[in-house]
Image: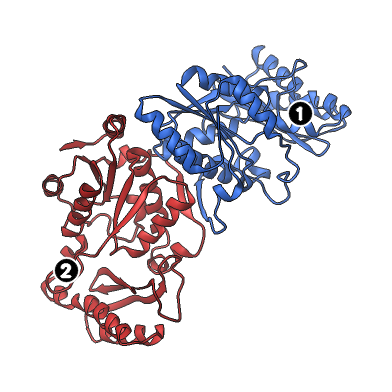
Chain colours: A blue, B red
Amino acid sequence: MTVATKISEVRQQVKDWKRNGLTVGLVPTMGYLHEGHASLIKTSVEHCDKTVVSVFLNPTQFAPNEDLESYPRDFDNDKKLCEEMGADLVFHPEVSEMYDEDSSTFVEILSDMPKQLCGKTRPIHFRGVCTVVSKLFNIVTPDKAFFGEKDAQQLAIIRKMVKDMSYGIEIIGCPIVRESDGLAKSSRNTYLSDEERKAALCLSKAVNLGKEIIANGEKNAETVISKMKELINNEPLAKIDYVEAVDGVTMNPVKEIKENTLVAMAVYIGKTRLIDNFSVK
Amino acid sequence: MTVATKISEVRQQVKDWKRNGLTVGLVPTMGYLHEGHASLIKTSVEHCDKTVVSVFLNPTQFAPNEDLESYPRDFDNDKKLCEEMGADLVFHPEVSEMYDEDSSTFVEILSDMPKQLCGKTRPIHFRGVCTVVSKLFNIVTPDKAFFGEKDAQQLAIIRKMVKDMSYGIEIIGCPIVRESDGLAKSSRNTYLSDEERKAALCLSKAVNLGKEIIANGEKNAETVISKMKELINNEPLAKIDYVEAVDGVTMNPVKEIKENTLVAMAVYIGKTRLIDNFSVK
């Protein structure tokens, strides 16, 4: 496995692979990799001849009041996990390699889509995501790219961007990976105190409750959402950002639960903002 | 030479070429090709193993009050010229092939650069240009792309976008091609009546005057510009949109003429808006 810090190294390697007719998978990450990322890498290795993992904490998707500075990092461990999962190349650039000081070009979806759900409290987030993912696409020129379903709105936005921008890249979503007690794996779980770690279970419990209510035939989104909110509000350390039912493609709110409805939430546990979701099959 | 109307055909052809280690040049055009385009195609054929010419009248770079509807078209002639110049593939998609009805993703430079010069009267123009050129880059994945220096601000903006968005594509600017009397070649010249055609010479005359004044040692931008404006204003059918001296990279106005200063103009001749420019060597 190669570690590249320069864009030019990645381009050269991928060019050689493509000249040999090999397919390339990309797993974009912000580092501090966990079993969720491991499953993305594993899926890429299964689907593609060569797998590139990018490890880049992207500043343009964080607002000044957010956790860019405190975001956990452990590149030695990331490298180890990538190698174990069978990645061929880890791209780990400095911020200055990815953004010139006067960098000012952005890729943005100018519809309501990035303003829904997480976009309500993170207005510049998805512009930063679309921009950095486009840049990674332009550097790696992968055949397929792998994203976690935990970031459901991000996945929907990337799919939309790929379609609108005519990228010849297949986007593959991979299921949420959970701790044994149900908590969705997240690099941000490391922020949680022992007490908060227990409280954080309210997210996956609300997911399970929502699934159950819907499996029992409830179609009214408001009914499902209000019961999920009730469960979360019973947890003193939890503060709801949002719990919403939206169309799985457009991210627009829906009143009736149906196939492909996404039920998504963001909840503060103390100062840590966690997300979780499920899609209705 | 192949004519492709579908994105998938272009991707397949380029994939085959790349697998054989061939380099690909892209010449993006809006059709109604003239000798200016011919020189771009010729340069691409010289630089690259394979040349793709796109012929697509891009609606997203026109405002509702502009000339999208009346823009001249002659695809049979375009095809003939491409073949004569040695192009390998002409990509001529329908609007619906390039843009879904709900297409809403845009690439935009969020600095003053696209607001200068033509951006003052065409505020959405360069967002449309950046978006369609990105899409063509994503479809064709060329090694090099060729743009005319007549659209000097467009060329500077594409260079900036390519740098900011980490495209691995070399941008090559090609000199303005002129009629024998000096008028810069443009698809829009076809709008001109005989009388207007004569009046339109004031643009290239102003270019020549500006060059001469600078060659004689004038460094003050205002002096150069005011003399050029005076020449144009002497033409009754001409109405100046702008005549400006700007930095050749940033497009910011300059007070002192120096190397790489761009002197650019847009002038209405009757209802037809024409542009011309020169760079200080």
Kind of residue at badge 2: Leu
The image position of residue B3, as x and y in percent, is 18, 37
* Whether marks 2 and 1 lie on the same chain: no
Q: Residue furthest top?
A: A216
Q: Nearer the viewer, residue A8 or A114?
A: A8
Q: Position of residue A93 (x, y in %)?
A: 58, 42
**Picture residue at 32% right of the left edge, 39% below the top:** B140
Q: What count of labels does the image hold? A: 2
Where residue A229 is drawn, which disc sits there? 1
- Give the percent coordinates (x, y) of residue B155: 35, 59
Q: Chain of mark 2?
A: B
Question: From the image, which quarter does the N terminus of chain B lie in?
Answer: top left
The residue identified by callout 2 is: B192
Left or right, residue B49 beside residue A279: left
Q: Is residue B137 above or below residue B19?
A: below
Q: Residue at x 67, y 17 (%)?
A: A211
In the picture, residue B221 is in which quadrant? bottom left
Q: Give the CA separation, mark 2 to mark 1.
A: 67 Å
Q: Residue at x 37, y 67 (%)?
A: B118
Which is more toward the observer, A23 or A186? A23
Place of residue A128 in the rendered image (x, y in percent of width and height, measured from the top left) = 58, 45
Picture residue at 37% right of the left edge, 64% below the top: B153
* Above/below status of A268 relative to B197: above
**Is B222 placed left or right of A149 in the picture?**
left
B217 and B13: which is toward the camera: B217
Which amino acid does the dot numbered 1 rest on? Lys
Q: Secondary structure at mark 1?
A: helix
Q: Is residue A35 visible?
A: yes
| Camera sees residue A32 | no
Disc marking residue A111: none
The chain ID associated with circle 1 is A
